[in-house]
Amino acid sequence: MNHSPSADSSMPLAARKIYVSLDTTARSKGSDNIATQVDKILSSQPDLAATLVRNGSRGMFWLEPLLEINTAKGRVAYGPVTPKDVSDIINQQCFDDVVEHPLCLGFTEELPWFKSQQRLTFARVGIIDPIDVDDYISHGGFVGLTNALAKTPQQLVDEVKDSGLRGRGGAAFPTGIKWQTVLDEPEQQKYIVCNADEGDSGTFADRMLMEGDPLVLVEGMIIAGLSVGANQGYIYLRSEYPQAQHILNQAIKNAKAAGYLGENICGSEHSFHLEVRLGAGAYICGEETSLLESLEGKRGLVRAKPPLPAIEGLFGQPTVVNNVISLASVPYILSHGGASYRDFGMGRSRGTLPIQLAGNIAQGGLVELAFGITLNELLQQYGNGCKSKRAMRSVQVGGPLGAYLPAEQWHTALDYEEFASIGAVLGHGGIVAFDDTVDMAAQARFAMEFCEVESCGKCTPCRIGSVRGVEVIDKIISTDNDEQQRQDSVNLLHDLCDTMEFGSLCAMGGMTPFPVRSALKYFPDDFLPQPSTEKAQ
């Protein structure tokens, strides 16, 4: 790599930009302090003529705070940066080329971890100013909407069907089929609701996108409205996401001012209005019918189905309820065509999935890849093993209701059907890693306890079953029981899991058995009484 600036590669003064992330994770690691230091330097040295841009995160969280400087050859990354490093970096010829510095990582787009991804939905995250409409447009924004305005609603729905896009929130229901159901309902008030109540453990893709490229979500919701005949949209946002709330509201305000929201969008006869509504701080409100109840101002209780929300949803009207990533994938589909999106992936799992690496992992962050990569490739190639440098023992995929997978299942490809075939769920793409100090009996107990705390309480299998589940697991691992009593408790736990799985009103109780059964099956020794051994959760 060339480390010396060339005479013909100087960056024009007007184009000089320094990027520091405003993503919540980056801020938690000190990016605001980096931005403050950059601002001070630029203010004290006006001859630099550079601009500070607060962008989204590239997803390489182990390298945050990341500082990027654009050059004529591309953006160069430095990290993790401390405030005292900033002056040293900027006062070199950093705007001309890669410079010799201990924290210099090279050209961001050429970093192996980043270069090997297929960024479709997250193509602009970390690149643009999140709330700048012109910046969004200059990077391909609103092309999908422009194309959508020239099509009929049925043509739009058919395009989404052709893409093979399935719900990215976890259920994996075909998005186009859901939209078709709403479109086929008689002409009346219809709604688009974005489920941004991201609550699964180890997940942050929704937040990262809303903070790094909120306008792609706005555009996706407008296209959804055009597709089914809805003129009102709501983003039901997790209350624990204040940064996302602020950025979304600014993005909506700017989009409206530019003519992309409100009456007669883009000079057309179509109208679309969009609001952000804060969630109730309950995990169960991530379930679509409970979300709708909460959005209506009621307690977040699960509704019985049928009727489906697509027929009787918000305020009893036909409603599209989709996850953030589902809706944010639509602009790419309308820009490049459904076939282009479908070209990525495998089997019935088409397109890409934002995969979140968390837990005891050396390189935590987000990677967007086509379906088909194996868990082991993700954990080693991208995650680089455990942060503790101990052996990895178990991985939970799909949030707190996902199965715990042992090493022999890490060859499984990320594909909805492949995961279902081993009794697991892919869910929202969150992966949480555990090293060999984990106590899997404690993790199984946590799953039942989590359900007990977060259940809406409407159905008996979930409300009572989770309480009894905690009690039974405590009996299994108790040192006071003989082997027969212990085996009776194990049998009882399996019966209880059957009742919860097949009798619960929604996936909250229905999926809690997944982590419990997988822990029992693959890590049985952890359920043996071990009075003298203590393991970390």
Image: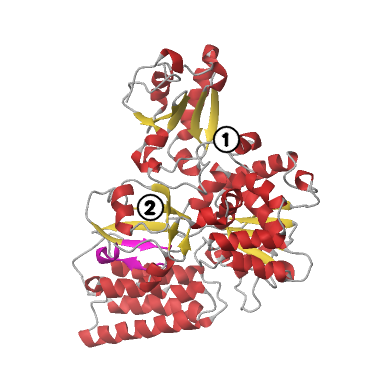
320 up-or-down from 302: above or below: above
- Looking at numbered disc 1 in the image, what kind of residue is underneath it? Asp
Q: Position of residue 216 (x, y in %)?
A: 60, 47
Q: Which residues are magenta?
A: 395-410
**Nearer to me, 187 or 303:** 187
Please indicate whether residue 378 sits to the left or right of residue 461 in the image.
left
536 up-or-down from 69: above or below: below
Please indicate whether residue 214 sits to the left or right of residue 513 in the image.
right
Q: Quadrant of residue 140?
A: top right
**Nearer to me, 110 or 272:** 110
Q: Position of residue 144 (x, y in %)?
A: 63, 48
Q: Position of residue 458 (x, y in %)?
A: 57, 77
* Label annotation for residue 41: none
Q: Earlier in the sequence, mark 2 or mark 1?
A: 1
- Looking at numbered disc 2 in the image, what kind of residue is underneath it? Ala
* Label annotation for residue 358: 2
Q: Residues under labels 2 and 1: Cα distance?
A: 26 Å
Res 137 visible: yes
Res 276 visible: no
* Position of the N terminus by quadrant: top left
198 up-or-down from 497: above or below: above
Q: Decide: marks 2, 1 in contact (CB < 8 A)?
A: no
**Nearer to me, 147 or 63:** 147
As helix, strand or loop, the secondary structure at mark 1 comes to loop
Q: Position of residue 82 (x, y in %)?
A: 39, 29
| Magenta segment includes 405 | yes
Q: What residue is shown with label 1?
A: 129
As helix, strand or loop, the secondary structure at mark 2 comes to strand
